[in-house]
């Protein structure tokens, strides 16, 4: 597949998650809730995650922002469901490395998330893509400290 075709496919995946977000909404019985924003562009997220016996049982988000931030939140909530917390945090590290243009562990199947790898070419948009992931990390770390 040529680079242009792959780029077009990635754009379609991002727009699909933006226009038809997965896991949008709130959880009444979440284990933790995190509100974060990106003041440089106005993206904001309200993330709820329910953890049962160390596994992410459910994840929902609400918020507003650009297509990249909202698509990334949709992809992230979809990707971490059913995963243990350690794996979810490892996925966040892999995603962060990918966004920074660094080498990353590709043992994990990132699924649709790989569509966001082109964001690394636009440094101003990296914070948009990583907002939901940073919110998840903050929620996990805050919960572990309690």
Image (cartoon, helix red, strand yellow):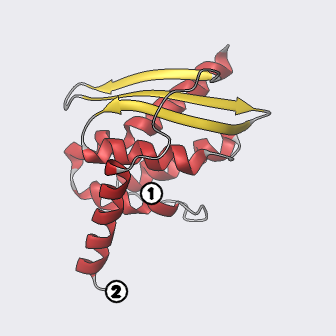
Question: What is the distance, in whole Å, between disc 2 and disc 1 at their CAs?
Answer: 19 Å
Mark 2 surroundings within 10 Å by alpha-carbon count, few (fewer than 14), some (14 through 19), many (20 or more): few
Residue that extends furthest to the top in the rendered view of this protein: 146
Quarter in which the C terminus is drawn: top right
What is the number of callouts on the image?
A: 2
- Judge whether 119 appears above or below 53 on screen: below
Please tell me in which quadrant of the rendered image residue 45 appears. top left
Residue under label 2: 1
Q: Residue at x 38, y 50 (%)?
A: 20
For the residue pair 19 and 14, the one nearer the viewer reads as: 19
Q: Which residue is drawn at 59% across and 19% down?
A: 142
For the residue pair 122 and 63, the one nearer the viewer reads as: 63
Judge from the rendering whether residue 91 lies leftward or rightward of residue 46; answer left or right: right
- The answer to whether the residues at label 2 and label 1 have Cβ atoms under 8 Å apart is no
Tell me, for residue 113, which label it has, or none. 1
Across and down, in percent, residue 93 comes to: 51, 46
Across and down, in percent, residue 118 comes to: 29, 61
The answer to which of marks 2 and 1 sits earlier in the sequence is 2
Please tell me in which quadrant of the rendered image residue 49 appears. top right
Residue that extends furthest to the bottom in the rendered view of this protein: 1
Q: Kindly tell me whether residue 95 is visible in this rendering.
A: yes
Q: Kindly tell me whether residue 103 is visible in this rendering.
A: no
Mark 1 surroundings within 10 Å by alpha-carbon count, few (fewer than 14), some (14 through 19), many (20 or more): many
SS at circle 1: helix
- Judge whether 57 appears above or below 138 on screen: below
Across and down, in percent, residue 90 comes to: 59, 47
SS at circle 2: loop
Across and down, in percent, residue 143 comes to: 64, 20
């Amino acid at each position: 597949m040529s680079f242009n075709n792959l780029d077009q496919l990635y754009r379609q995946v991002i727009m699909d998650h933006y226009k038809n977000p997965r896991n949008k909404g709130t959880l009444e019985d979440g284990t933790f809730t995190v509100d974060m924003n990106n003041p440089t562009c106005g993206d904001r997220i309200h993330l709820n995650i329910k953890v049962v016996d160390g596994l992410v049982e459910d994840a929902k988000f609400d918020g507003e922002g650009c297509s990249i931030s909202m698509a990334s939140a949709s992809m992230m909530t979809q990707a971490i469901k059913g995963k243990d917390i350690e794996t979810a945090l490892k996925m966040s590290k892999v995603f962060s490395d990918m966004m920074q243009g660094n080498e990353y562990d590709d043992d994990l199947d990132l699924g649709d998330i790989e569509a966001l790898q082109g964001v690394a070419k636009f440094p101003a948009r990296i914070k948009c893509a990583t907002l939901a992931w940073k919110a998840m990390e903050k929620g996990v770390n805050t919960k572990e400290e309690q």
